[in-house]
Amino acid sequence: MSRVAVFGAGSWGTAFSLVLTDAGNDVTMWARRQELSDTINARHENTDYMPGIVLADSIRATHDPEEALTDASVVALAVPSQTLRANLEHWAEYIPDDAVVMSLMKGVEVGTAKRMSEVIEDVAGIGADRVAVLTGPNLSREIASRQPAASVIACADEAVAEGLQVRCHTPAFRPYTNTDVVGCELGGAAKNVIALAVGMAVGLGFGGNATATVITRGLAEIARLGTALGADPYTFSGLAGLGDLVATCSSPLSRNRSFGEKLGQGQSVEEIAASTRQVAEGVRSCESIRDLAVRSGVEMLIVEAVASLVRGEMGPQEMLSRLISRAAKPERA
């Protein structure tokens, strides 16, 4: 049995803790609030983020990062991406020297435009051979309900990815391995922004033609950015690319799709954010992904439009109208 520390007791951290225990690991969850960790330990349920799902007795929760990390062979990070750096500055000293750190986050850091694995390497001083990412079409509620799902574990060291694959494989959760960390992370982060645009189209009352157009052109944008940054183009036709994009854009369980839908219905970014505890990563990461595209000389018109909307420079109707009414050109241009 491996000891795994999961940092983040939100929906995804809780769901993935269930995967880990189903795979035979001993799991300790770190919760930001002491009262939440106490509730999880007393009731074996995360009543705030995953009500109705029974947590195994082998899942323990704590508010103490040192306690969570003691003897951990794997550290899974499931906090909001824009809080990672500040949090990791407090946690890094307790991470065991031989532990593998696995990012469950899907974002690009505001200001630096760094991927989450790069932030981990930067703050914790850990080499790329000990940093992995898990990504794919993984809606947390479905995972927690043990519905069938697949994912990708990417690491520069293929042997490390294979070791994590064994630790995460259950009858309901099938992880594949990959060494394309760049492509897997960019696919996971950028699809959140595309899902916001798809949600806006739905909120405005548009149908399948509009949403399919945004999804398909969004995938083209993601692939262009990834290729420019050295990713394997094939990655974007797999689980970390198309798979994650389809799930996030199609399901009402998706936070980013739901957030975009409310924008399309006329609510403001501030109103929606104030009404939920859940974080829609695309809202925060759209600006940093745009910056990354500009630095790379890559055109990402959907991402640019979503970032402009989040800044308050245009509304959903104007945004989608501008995207459709642009000058016509060859599809692969």
Image (cartoon, rainbow, N blue to C red):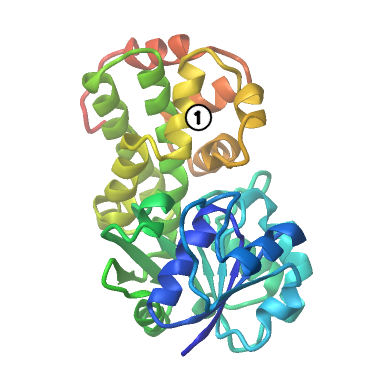
The answer to which of 74 and 20 lies nearer the viewer is: 20
Q: Residue furthest front?
A: 43
What is the quadrant of residue 178 in the picture? bottom left
Q: Is residue 289 something one can see in this rendering?
A: no
The answer to which of 321 and 246 lies nearer the viewer is: 246
Instruction: Decide if residue 269 is on the left or right side of residue 151.
Output: right
Q: Is residue 330 something one can see in this rendering?
A: yes
Q: Is residue 80 above or below residue 274?
A: below
Tell me residue 46's x, y (percent). 57, 57
Which residue sits at x=41%, y=50%?
A: 141
Which residue sits at x=34%, y=64%?
A: 152
What is the quadrant of residue 90 in the picture? bottom right
Crowdedness near tag 1: few (<14), some (14–19) or many (≥20) residues, C-alpha within 10 Å: many
What is the quadrant of residue 121 in the picture? bottom right
Tell me residue 25's x, y (percent). 46, 82
> Which residue is under mark 1?
259
Tell me residue 82's x, y (percent). 65, 49
**Looking at numbered disc 1 in the image, what kind of residue is underneath it?**
Phe
Instruction: Decide if residue 208 is on the left or right side of residue 64.
Output: left
Which residue sits at x=50%, y=29%?
A: 259
The answer to which of 293 and 44 lies nearer the viewer is: 44
Q: Is residue 270 above or below residue 27?
A: above
Which residue sits at x=47%, y=36%?
A: 256
